[in-house]
Amino acid sequence: FSILGSAIPNIAISHKRCVDVTYPNFWNDLEMRLHAKVGPVSQKISTDVKQSEATIWLVGMRGVGKSTLGKEVAKAMGRSFIDLDKHFEIRHGSKIRAFVEKYSWREFRERELKLFKEFINTHPKGYVIACGAGLVETPEAMEAFQRLPVVVQINRHIDDVAAFLSKDSTRPALRKEGKYVWDSHAIWAARKPLYEAASSYEFTIIKGDSKWNCIIGDFVRFLQTITMNPVGRAGLIDQDVKDVDVTKLVGGTFFLSLTFPNMLQAVPIMQDLVAGNSAIELRVDLWESWEPSFIQEQIAIFRRHCCLPIVYTIRTIDQCGKFPNKEKPLFRLYELGIRLGCEYIDMEHHWSRAARNKLMRHRRHSKIIASAHFKNSNGGTEIDLENTFRLCAHGGRADVVKVVTTAYCLEDAIRLVHVAKNVKLPGNPPKIILAMGAVGQISRVFNEYLTPVTHELMPGIAAPGQLSISEIMAARRMLSIRAPLKRKIYIIGQNMDVSLAPLLINTAFKYLHLEHSATVFEAKDVSLAPIVKLMKSQGFGGACISSPFKASIIPFLSHLSDSAKAIGAVNVVALLNNGGLYGHNTDWSSLYIKLVAERPKLNGRRAIVIGSQGTARAACYALLKYGYDSQGIVVHDPWSHKGAQQTAEHFGVTSAKNIEKLQNINVVICTFRKLGTPEMESYLLPLTVVQQTPVLIDFRYFPLHTKLEEQAAVYGCNTLRGLDLLILQNIEQLKLFVGVENWAMVESAAPVIDRAVRHLFYQKYVTN
């Protein structure tokens, strides 16, 4: 075949050592005597695969958790997981340690490289693949890594790695300078630059962290960010309502500028700090160290306690910050921010064109905020300001344009606002405008997109004249600037005397600094005429729909989400900008989120849905979305077997009049919303079911502990309360009211809303 390859192109021989015994000088003779060009096979890597679809390759030291994390994130992101080391062992019928002892490290590395190159070609997208720890030592593999779209280094502190490996005798000994050693620190020192060169991203595990459930959650969010494709839990829900043009109940977005020198100082008050923001600015120039390892750890700590997007900012001395005015170290740290998966990079616009262009070419998933700060200037004339905006736009390549001036009088701030409103920029990027100083605060009131804010719990402000969200919103309402019209959210249903929804939504509006209100609309009968009239009234902002109207209201809605169509029921209605009404269902999404958190196993397991009404239909839908087989979902209604049959038939699942003999049950979902009849109040599971210790999810929240929950607790079942589901369900409804692009602000406020509602529930229903 080599001789044939001298005349016919594109013939590749994958194992060049096949002639080592019979003709050792073959390749040299082929090149010297036949003048054939002999060299490594050129690895062709598809360049048309989107980053959102590209296979995610994991590299890092042994013991960092590549396989553990890879399996879980693949499941969460709807991908398949492959461990190249395991695949090598299957293919060669031998453990790697035994293979190395029998053949040699050299032979292992050559066959490992062959397998790696094969998988590059056969698995370009849709996978998460963990690579062997030493693959980066092979130069040809390094070249391939650097051409792959998404390679993530998992970085765990070497002390933690060494401690883990000292207890593991199943792995082959490490090699350094031809000697077999177990010195993990020495190996790390040699491989660290190789891992960095091979990878495009880096995920850092906090030193000493052993909370793997939390680490997995952090890693899932990290990968969803860098692949720009929030699949899994978030993706399913995003996809359902992503194109909805609702009348938004918010008036602009904010980001908090954190000024702590160390994130550990912010952790105890993080939930209160971030509530109501859509992003968080990390002022790296104010940190106590600018060493890459410190920055990596700080961002990992922040991500553990806050899921909001990061605005990664390093402000130099000339631009109102503390970092030295040195371009090369500044841009190295900018690149580190991209590598660490930060969503926004605030790039100062005055540095060399070459440095700025390089950063924008290699931004990957990150959005570039091109910023100009006038420390001791009002920015000049309108023409000067227009030129500054255009320079920051970078011909349409900047994702966001930020211009900050110093205001010496009110006119300076108004001029900046006027120019920002009227200047036309290529690509029409959103603008952030601020005039520093007390007289410039009006600019923060006018700014609509990601206004930088402070908080009373902060150690100091990031810029002169900075205000809090509550101060800005109060000014907007007083001046009727950027403030949304006051609207009412109605909680519609019957027997709503113990409904928690108004309490929860009004608490949310308080923490989001909005003046809307939620109130109960108690329907006297099943007639829909009063409800339809209400939804057409002045000031209507949306509705939460309870029984018995979840299905009957649908004909009066102009649009439905895909989930609402599939379920045949809605529990939330939003007002569209065109005057229409949009119906959605968050019963299923709140349950789905809880299922993902619990991670019940699927293989051969069954879930029982108790009930047959709207919530039961949502439960069936959530179970199917989670991955249960249609034969693994059983609908059971003790009071209406016909209803159970109809619900089961709608989703193609099974129903059962009696559930005593069902086996392999690992989830039971009780969908009764209220206790209702004495029979419902005293309902218990058959012993044959509860003794299988399934996860019990009870949608009822009053009383806090139902008889069914008490029974499950006695038998050791893990239980999820209706109060947990209700809070999550209403938070998902709030996201619809504010619009998909503003979901982050609801997520930021969710922990404090949750805490406040539980406290109020305790005061109202438990202590009384």
Image: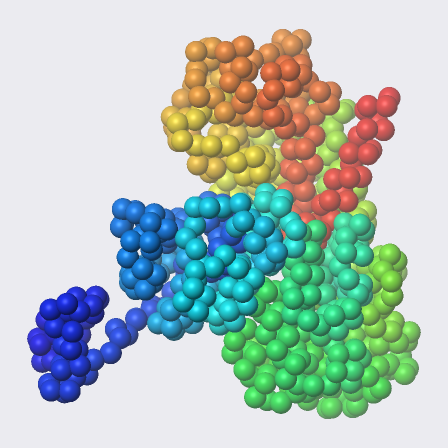
Is residue 655 rendered to the left or right of residue 251?
left
From the viewer's perspective, is 48 left or right of 336?
left
- Up-down: is 539 above or below 626? below
* Position of residue 75 measured from the top left corner of the image (x, y, whole percent): 46, 45
Split into 4 quadrants, where in the image is the C terminus?
top right
Q: Position of residue 491 (x, y in %)?
A: 71, 34
Residue 308 appears in the picture as rendered:
no
Instruction: Provide residue 433's location: percent of width, then percent of height.
Output: 75, 75
Query: What residue is at 87 percent from the left and 71 percent from the top?
Result: 465
Q: Is residue 368 above or below residue 454?
A: below
The vertical placement of 648 against 577, above or below, is above
Identity of the residue furthest to the front in this view? 179
Residues 581 and 392: in front is: 392
Q: Residue at x 76, y 42 (%)?
A: 753
Left or right: residue 290 versus residue 564 is right
Query: If the image is split into quadrants, where does the N terminus sit?
Result: bottom left
* Above or below 460: residue 599: above
